Every structure is written in C-alpha cells, then in structure tokens.
Image (cartoon, rainbow, N blue to C red):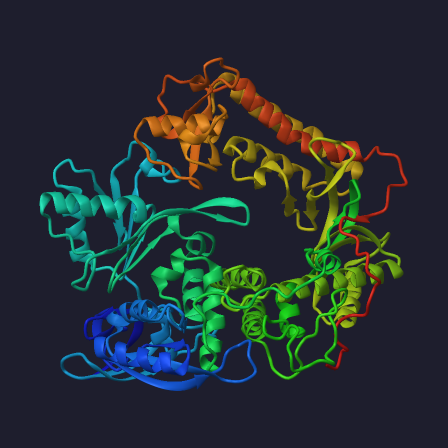
C-alpha cells in the first residue's frame, strides 16, 4: 500500500521505528520501519576493540566491525569500532554495556536522539510531507520525502487540536493553590469538566475518543492537568487512553539547575506516543513564537516536536551542527573533548572580554538614528568562517589573524558552525523579504518563523563557548567577540569622520545624530559602513527623540541599558524601565506604558515637557485608584524567582515569606520556580503580615497602598528624567568606552576578496 501524508511522530518500538503519518483526509496511519540500525562508535586499543566487539555481539543483536572515522580535531582518521544495533529499543542498553565492559573506551554517536538519527538516515524530518510504501502488515518498504526543511511557504498537516486549560488564574502555577474546573475546547466547542456529575478523567477520555485529536495543546498540562487526570483514572479504574499507541505515557522529572550564574527550573514533561502534546506554560518557543514558530524549529532542527517544544533552542542548534558532522562522517563525542588553549595572563586578559559597550550621553536628543548590524555575530561566523575547528587550525599557519588576539582562521575548509548559520541567515532574510508583500495572515506566520530562527541564531554564538557544547571551543567565542569589537570601533570612527555625533554604542548597534540629517543620509552612512566592514548594517529606526537615563542610585552616572526612544510612527522602544521587568506588577507596567504612549507624540524638548504634564494626569489617576481601593488584585501581583529552597532563606525578604507561606500549605517548591505574591503591609513587625502568596489570597486581606504608590512614583520618575535632562548644562561629556582595548588597533580580519 502507498500512503501520502505528514510525519506526525516517530519513536523506537519493539519491531523497529514507529512512524505515524497524518494523511490529507486527517486519517492517521502507524507504520513500522524495521530497516533502521542505529550505530555508535568506540575508540580504544585495537585488541580492546576486538574484545568489545565479541562481547557486544554475543549479548545483543548487533553488527560490529572495525572501521575509520574522522575526528573533528585530528588531521588523520581515527580507528573505531562500529556497533550497529538491530533493535533500536536496545540501543541505550548496548551503549551502557560498552561503557561497563571497557570504561577506558571513548564513545561517539552514543547519546543521540534515535528519532532524530532516524530522520538523518532516511532524509526526512518532523512534519515533513512524505510518501511511504508499506506491506499489508504496515511494515515500511520505502520512504520518500516530498518536502524541504528549508522551504519557505510549506504546507502544514491538517492537525485536529484539542485545548485544555484550568479556568481562572491561567498565569499562576495551579500547583500553588486552589484550582478551578478543567476547560476543554475542540472544534469551537468548550466543555467544562468539574467532577460534579462525571469524573473529569472519564469525561476527558470521552472527549479524546470523540475528537481523536492529533495535538493536545494545554496550559500547565505537563505538571498538573495530565498527571492529575492519569492519577484519577488509575484510582477509579477509568480507561483513559492518551496515547494512540499501546504504550505508557512517558513522564520526565522536574529539576533545578544553574546556568550562567542563575538558578533555573525545568518542569516535568508528559510525552505522548502517536499524538502530540504541547504545554504552552512549559515551552519557551511555543510561548514566544506560537505554534508556527515551533513547527519551523522542529523542521530545521529535526528534533521531535514534543522534544523541541520543551528543550532549549541551544539544543536545536547543537543538533543542526551534529547533523552536518554526521553527514561529513565526523564522529560526535558524547562530551566536549577540546580543552582551552594555554594562555599567558596577559593573553587571557586580552581574550576574555565580551562585546564592546559605550557609556551613553545622558539626556534628551532629537533626530537620532539607530544603526544596527544585522545578526552581527552569526554573520561574523558565516563571513569569516569562525567555527570551533577552524580557529587556530594546524593546516593554515599563514592564515589571516583575528584583531587583538592573533588567532588564525582556516582557509581550506568551511566550519560546521559557519555552514549552519549561513543557511539560517539566508532563510530569515528571505522570509523578511516575502513578508512585505504577503497577506496579513501569511505575514504573521512569517514573523513567527523568523522569530524562531532568530532564537536559534542567538544561541549559536553562545554555544561556541558553552562548557558542554560537543563542538565548542572558547577560542572561537573569543574570536567572534574580538571581530565584533573591531567592527563597532570601525563603524564609530567612520561615522565620526563624516560629522555624526555618537550618542551610544552597544555591542552591535550605534545611536548617531547630525543636525539636519535625513533618512537618506543615515541610510547612506549605513551603506558605507557595510562596504568597509564587510558586515551588513541597516538603519533600524529613525527616532524623533531618545532619552538616555542615569542609574537609579546616582543621577549623574549613565548606564548603557536604560533609555527609551520614540520612533517616527510613534512606536516606543524601551530598555531598562519597569515595564520590561518580569517582576513588575501589571498595574505599574500599565501606567508606565500609558504614560509613554502620551510621550511618544512629542517631537522636541518643548513638546516633551507639554506631554509630560498630560502623563502626570495618568499617574494621578492610578494613584487615586490605589487610594480608593479600586484596583483588581491581579494587577498587584509581583513575580519573583526562588534562588534556594524556601526553608533555606535566612532573612525575611518578601519573596522568602511568600515561598514559606506556600511551603506551609503543602506546596513543594524548588529553586528556579516562580512565586507570586501581593504586598499587604511592607512595614509590619510580623513578617507573615508583610505579603500574601497570591495562590493563598483571601478576600479579607488588604494591599499596602503606600508601597504600591511608591512603586508607581518610582516608575514615573524615569520619565521625569527626560524633562530634567533638557536643562543640563552643555557641552556634554563625550561618549566613552566601558571596555577600552589596550592593544594597538589592527586592520579587520580578512581583505574584501577573501
């Protein structure tokens, strides 16, 4: 039989790889591909590899042979033992056995996702349109892909979607307090399951059977909805069939972890088989880029949809690099293998620096242009071939040098990272071009696709220096930063040479102004900088005015990331203000947003002062609502991330008090999780009276009017700074670099024709 459809799900099963296809008529088909033989490699002494082959072969159904493969860091091929396992379900056990039998052997390709490895071998990817030929007992004979992961206007499968959410406090973790009824929506109908007449698990099972959804789209489904339904079904012996396959629902544990100095929390995951489950409350990409962005991410990374929804975009970029390595015949280590090169203290001080940041000119400035390098760090990787294996390669001793650092960059081969980012950049640029002439619906989809690709590109730079990256190397990370610093300095000097005033420079962007300059003048400057630096820079925006703000502690000390701008169309760009913070109460953020909307109509200092008087009326209205008690309690919620378990806090900080209240009510909290609370009486002598956890809120509590009034006034004070800066004495101090380069200036890395 021949089946035409989209790949919905793929996972190892007892007979091979299970492949679920969704046909155009919305029928689903489960096929089994028994031809898949996942392989890993082991490197040791030849005699040890022969012993390992005999041991593995006798314990598992596996083909073992000695062969050679490329190691990314070595010039000559590496002798390895290839172990191809007949049954994919036995692959992890075979890897563990190899580690146990020879702990000294180094393993490669041993911890890859089998679904992704299957996609690499068969030339397919999640949600791809394929044609499959199968026998009567549903065994795959042939599989052909009729799709391209780099296509722009691709056809998506006709998914049947069932949404599930908890009524009421949708943004608050339902594990922290009382929960409302379960709301289920499918095909435009909303069903409320409240256990009143029929157990929720029984009603949910009937809805699953009735609608047979391809996708369960939930809010808090991973941690709360599906686990509670499964518990109730098990307790009452209700047949709740969440999977389409006869397998148990897969559950992973929640955990706290440290990343770049911050404590983060990764929630548990509930993964289904034959049916997709996406939890918007537990998926960064689905939250930021919606389903269109998630589909784009799964297609280009070839990660299973449910895994792509819950993992980081860094994992996605890592798998894209590993696919290229796999296709090149390069071994993929289970752990990072390349150590940092030895450096003297002086070399380390020169190399261990980030992007270049200037202190801004304090004050109010009109007719300001923002020139922004387009995806600068990815473009540096692509344009200058910066990749972990190309920096300081042994084959090019006379290669051009990286500014300041003197690192060499390979001229004989393209780096894996360079090849990955150039495809992402090209697709993102083409989506932007098509977006201009697309219909509103298609334009919105392209925007979400571009956002998903943007997050991949953002992670690409960080992964070059990530301590656990398979192909990471800190020298590549340092080289990218060095080129970016040199490029920004070059752009700054070129602008100043043409009479432009530099107000601020921040890693990959310049804020410049010139009396009487027009949009055409700024675009011409951008074109000249692009030609000289070999990196594209564009006029990101032309602002009516920009206000660079001082620090909160000292009103004469500027900070790089506190400012706001009003564009030609009135759109505001805000950095460092309260409305950008995750812990700002919605009331304060809304007041600041309304005030900025009024100030966006200003064109110069005089009109700004007039608009500020109107904005003060907005502040007065919010203060009056607070005093009269006419504020919804949801608008006063403060959200904070825990840095430790509740019982380990030593001081009675507001966050610690709220966490301990939840702990006392039986809620299990971990570091990295977020708690929500209301300030009830900030100055109370009894700590427990100072705040109340929002999940435990009772109507008889009152909020601290004075404290919330202070938060409103503090948020408005930033806008007052714009008026105060108008009266500052001129001339102003010049823009200064925060990270000066002590080394002599050098020319840019490569000549234009390299």
* Along the viewing direction, whichever of 709 and 581 lies nearer the viewer: 581
Q: Which residue is drawn at the image coordinates 66% and 50% (left, top)?
A: 569
Which quadrant of the view contains residue 373?
bottom right
Farthest front residue? 47
Measured along the vertical axis of the image, is residue 273 above or below residue 37? above
Residue 113, picture quadrant: bottom left
* Nearer to me, 566 or 363: 363
Residue 441 visible, this angle: no
- Residue 185 in picture, x, y percent from top left: 27, 49
Which residue is pictured at 48% across the width and 79% down the height?
330
Quadrant of the drawing holding the N terminus: bottom left
x, y percentage for residue 621?
Answer: 58, 24
Residue 275 vs 282, above or below: the answer is below
Q: Residue furthest right?
A: 731
The reply to whether residue 90 is in sight is: yes
Tag count? 0
Which quadrant holds residue 693? top left
Q: Is residue 198 left or right of residue 643?
A: left
Is residue 345 positioned above or below 196 on the image? below
Find residue 222 and report its horizontal and vertical position in percent: 31, 49
On the picture, is 82 further left or further right than 724? left
- Where does residue 324 sit, x and y in percent of width and height? 48, 77
Q: Quadrant of the C terminus?
A: bottom right
Name of the residue lying farthest toward the left:
237
User: What residue is at 39 percent from the left and 27 percent from the top?
Assistant: 660
The answer to whether 584 appears left or right of 609 in the picture is left
């Amino acid at each position: 039989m021949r089946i035409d459809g989209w790949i919905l799900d793929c996972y190892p099963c007892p007979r091979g790889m299970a492949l679920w296809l969704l046909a155009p008529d919305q029928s689903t088909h489960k096929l089994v591909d028994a031809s898949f033989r996942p392989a890993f490699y082991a490197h040791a002494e030849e005699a040890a590899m022969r012993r390992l082959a005999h041991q593995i072969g006798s314990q598992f159904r596996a083909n073992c042979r000695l062969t050679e493969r490329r190691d990314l860091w070595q010039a000559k091929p590496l002798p390895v033992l290839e172990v191809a396992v007949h049954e994919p379900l036995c692959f992890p056990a075979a890897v563990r056995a190899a580690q146990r039998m020879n702990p000294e052997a180094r393993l490669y390709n041993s911890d890859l996702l089998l679904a992704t490895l299957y996609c690499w071998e068969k030339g397919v990817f999640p949600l791809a349109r394929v044609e499959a030929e199968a026998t009567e007992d549903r065994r795959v004979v042939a599989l052909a892909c009729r799709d391209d992961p780099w296509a722009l206007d691709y056809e998506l499968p006709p998914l049947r979607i069932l949404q599930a959410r908890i009524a009421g406090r949708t943004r608050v973790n339902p594990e922290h307090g009382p929960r409302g009824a379960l709301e289920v929506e499918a095909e435009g109908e909303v069903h409320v399951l409240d256990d009143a007449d029929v157990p929720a698990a029984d009603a949910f099972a009937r809805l699953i059977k009735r609608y047979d959804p391809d996708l369960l789209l939930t809010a808090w489904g991973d941690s709360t909805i599906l686990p509670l339904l499964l518990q109730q079904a098990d307790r009452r012996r209700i047949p709740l069939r969440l999977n389409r396959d006869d397998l148990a629902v897969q559950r992973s544990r929640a955990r706290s972890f440290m990343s770049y100095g911050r404590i983060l929390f990764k929630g548990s995951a509930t993964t289904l088989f034959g049916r997709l489950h996406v939890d918007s409350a537990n998926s960064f990409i689905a939250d930021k880029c919606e389903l269109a962005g998630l589909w784009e991410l799964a297609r280009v990374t070839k990660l299973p949809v449910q895994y792509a929804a819950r993992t980081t975009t860094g994992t996605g970029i890592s798998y894209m690099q590993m696919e290229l390595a796999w296709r090149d015949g390069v071994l993929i280590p289970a752990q990072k293998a390349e150590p940092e090169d030895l450096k003297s203290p002086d070399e380390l001080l020169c190399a261990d620096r980030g992007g270049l940041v200037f202190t801004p000119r304090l004050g109010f400035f009109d007719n300001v242009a923002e020139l922004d390098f387009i995806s600068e760090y990815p473009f540096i990787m692509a344009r200058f071939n910066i990749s972990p294996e190309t920096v300081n390669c042994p084959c090019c001793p006379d290669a051009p040098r990286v500014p300041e650092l003197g690192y060499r960059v390979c001229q004989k081969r393209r780096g894996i990272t360079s090849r990955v980012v150039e495809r992402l950049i090209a697709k993102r640029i083409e989506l932007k071009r098509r977006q201009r002439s697309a219909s509103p619906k298609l334009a919105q989809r392209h925007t979400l696709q571009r956002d998903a690709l943007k997050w991949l590109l953002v992670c690409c730079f960080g992964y070059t220096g990530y301590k656990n990256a398979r192909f990471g190397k800190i020298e590549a990370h340092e080289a990218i930063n060095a080129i970016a610093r040199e490029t920004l300095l070059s752009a700054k000097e070129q602008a100043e040479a043409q009479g432009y005033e530099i107000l601020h420079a921040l890693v990959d962007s310049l804020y410049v102004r010139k009396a009487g300059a027009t949009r055409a003048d700024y675009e011409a400057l951008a074109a000249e900088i692009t030609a000289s630096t070999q990196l594209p820079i564009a006029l990101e925006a032309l602002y009516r005015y920009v206000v660079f703000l001082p620090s909160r502690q000292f009103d004469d000390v500027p900070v790089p990331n506190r400012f706001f701008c009003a564009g030609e169309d009135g759109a505001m760009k805000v950095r460092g203000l309260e409305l950008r913070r995750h812990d700002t109460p919605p009331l304060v953020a809304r007041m600041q947003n309304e005030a900025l909307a009024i100030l966006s109509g200003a064109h110069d200092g005089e009109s700004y002062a007039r608009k500020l008087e109107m904005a003060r009326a907005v502040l007065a209205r919010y203060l009056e609502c607070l005093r009269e008690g006419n504020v919804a309690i949801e608008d006063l919620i403060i959200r904070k991330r825990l840095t430790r378990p509740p019982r380990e806090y030593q001081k009675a900080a507001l966050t610690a008090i709220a966490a301990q209240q939840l702990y006392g009510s039986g809620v299990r909290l971990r570091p990295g999780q977020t708690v929500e609370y209301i300030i009830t009486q900030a100055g109370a002598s009894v700590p427990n009276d100072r705040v109340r956890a929002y999940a435990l809120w009772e109507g008889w509590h009152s909020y601290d009017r004075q404290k919330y009034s202070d938060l409103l006034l503090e948020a408005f004070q930033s806008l007052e700074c714009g008026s105060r800066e108008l009266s500052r004495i001129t001339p102003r101090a010049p823009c200064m670099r925060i990270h000066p380069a002590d080394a002599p200036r050098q020319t840019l890395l490569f000549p234009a024709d390299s």
